[in-house]
Amino acid sequence: MDKVYIIAQKADSQSDAVGHGVKLSRQLDMAPEVFAYSYEHLPDFAHYIPAVTPVTQAAIVKKAKKAVEQKLAELGAEQVPVQSLWCKHLYEHACKTAHQQGFKLIVKAIHASDHFLPTDWHIIRYTKVPVLFLSDKPQQTGKDVLVAVDLGSNSPVKQKLNKAVVAKGRALAAATGGKLHVAYVSRMHVVINDLDLVDNATVAAAARKRFADELTALNLPDEQIHVVAGDPELCLYDLSCRLKAQYFVIGARQRKGILGHVIGNTAETVLSKMRSHVLVIPAFDELL
């Protein structure tokens, strides 16, 4: 049975990653495992009382495991394995472990952070396993799944990623009882929009005609295929809100290094705005 890697939430204000992860695992007929990560700065007692630091760390790790086990008991899921560990760089351990141990999905609550590179950005850039980020401000109604595709690219990787994203979205919709919606945004430069040089509706109609074969191949009703023109981040956010989509699925090319700092990618920008839970599919060979 395929496995789900659930990263336990750290704060009550975040989405319930354990509860949502266990429920989704049941819907997808997958086996959940929970990982509780702990790390915080401790006073430097090591020089004076060497035994204090490891004892304190062990106490914090034990407390985190107990909290997860209590939550699982409330869910009637006491049999779910729990690992509690002290780890400074969550993303490194989670990405490496999930891939090496054959997990098919990571579930994590969005981590609100003012840091330049939050943990979630690191995970998007380094994961080789699809990651579901749970919004801390989710839609209150709706079960549908919205998938974003990039039909305008001739890149073989992008084309394979489109197929992978649609396949994951279709499976998610089937498991959760929602409808699958697919969206393509024809990117319009902000200057063109501000100057009203081109009508967005005209551009969208032309894009629908240009990619008619690809859209027909989706085998979906017309009302579940959305072609719009404008800024992708804003258009996708607006569409997900109008549809009250529970899940939003998007691919990520995973830019790293200086290029990643400067350019980023659409998945990272969407993550900070979206009120749907966001499933990120990395452009990793084994998934395409």
Image (cartoon, grey):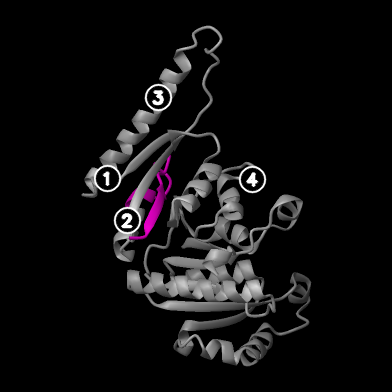
* Viewer-nearest of discs 3 and 2: 2
Disc 4 to disc 3: CB gap under 8 Å: no
Tag on residue 58? Answer: 3
Label 1 crowd bin: few (<14), some (14–19), many (20+), radius 10 Å: many
The answer to whether residue 52 is seen in the rendering is yes
Highlighted magenta segment, given as a residue range: 1-20
Position of 212 with respect to 79 (left or right) is: right
Tag on residue 31? Answer: 2
Tag on residue 117? Answer: 4
Label 2 crowd bin: few (<14), some (14–19), many (20+), radius 10 Å: some
**Of the residues shown, which amino acid type is indicated by label 3?**
Ala
Tag on residue 72? Answer: 1
**Of the residues shown, which amino acid type is indicated by label 1?**
Leu
* Viewer-nearest of discs 4 and 3: 3
Q: Residue 57, located in which quarter of the rendered image?
A: top left
Question: What quarter of the picture does the N terminus occupy?
Answer: bottom left
Residue appearing at x 53%, y 17% in the figure: 43
Separation of marks 2 and 4 at Cα, in angstroms: 31 Å
Disc 4 to disc 1: CB gap under 8 Å: no
Which callout, 1 or 3, points at the residue further toward the start of the chain? 3
SS class, disc 1: helix
Separation of marks 1 and 2 at Cα, in angstroms: 14 Å
* Viewer-nearest of discs 2 and 4: 2
Q: Is residue 8 magenta?
A: yes
**Of the residues shown, which amino acid type is indicated by label 2?**
Ala
